[in-house]
Image: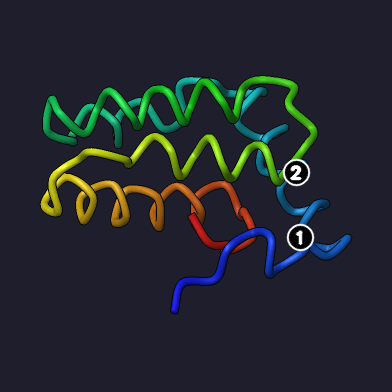
Amino acid sequence: AEISMADMKPTPEMIEKFKEGRNKLKANPTMIDEAIGKLSAEAQVPAKKFRDMMLSDEEDLDKFHAEAKALKEGLSDAVKKELDEHRAAVVAKLGLPKGPA
């Protein structure tokens, strides 16, 4: 069973890690562009939208996760797998909390 953000409230530590990762990306907005460039054309579109979401000032993490999840709707399994691998690399690079998406 997939855990949703409704089932899992972010802890203060997760929120802090998210903010730190976001600030790291805002300080260097192109730091994940190389990784995005390695994705297939189909995967680059949602990956760029996710990067733009990270660069936004959205504070509501429930809304953020809902939007992030919506980016993958209607994509092929192969593209979803590609995006999951990309997400794992970005999470590691930015030190983000590993939440559901």
Q: Of residues 53 and 31, which is closer to you in this image?
A: 53
Q: Quadrant of residue 46?
A: top left
Answer few, some or many: residues within 10 Å of disc 1's Cα (few below 14, many 20 plus, some between 14 and 19). some
59 versus 16 height, above or below: above
Residue 67 drawn at (x, y percent): 53, 35
Residue 26 drawn at (x, y percent): 65, 23
16 versus 13 height, above or below: above
At x 67%, y 35%, the residue is 22
At x 24%, y 27%, the residue is 44
Q: Is residue 99 left or right of residue 17?
A: left
Residue picked out by circle 2: 20
Identify the mark at residue 14; answer none if there is no mark: 1
Nearer the camera: disc 1 or disc 2 = 1
At x 45%, y 45%, the residue is 69
68 versus 28 height, above or below: below
Q: Amino acid at mark 1?
A: Met
Image marks 1 and 2: residues in contact by CB distance under 8 Å:
no
Identify the mark at residue 61; answer none if there is no mark: none
Q: Which quadrant would the N terminus be assigned to in this image?
A: bottom left
Answer few, some or many: residues within 10 Å of disc 2's Cα (few below 14, many 20 plus, some between 14 and 19). some
Q: Earlier in the sequence, mark 1 or mark 2?
A: 1
Q: Quadrant of residue 42?
A: top left
Q: Residue furthest bottom?
A: 1
Which secondary structure lies at badge 2?
helix
Q: Is residue 22 left or right of residue 68?
A: right
Q: Amino acid at mark 2?
A: Glu
Residue 10 drawn at (x, y percent): 77, 61
At x 40%, y 50%, the residue is 87
Q: Of residues 100 and 12, which is closer to you in this image?
A: 100
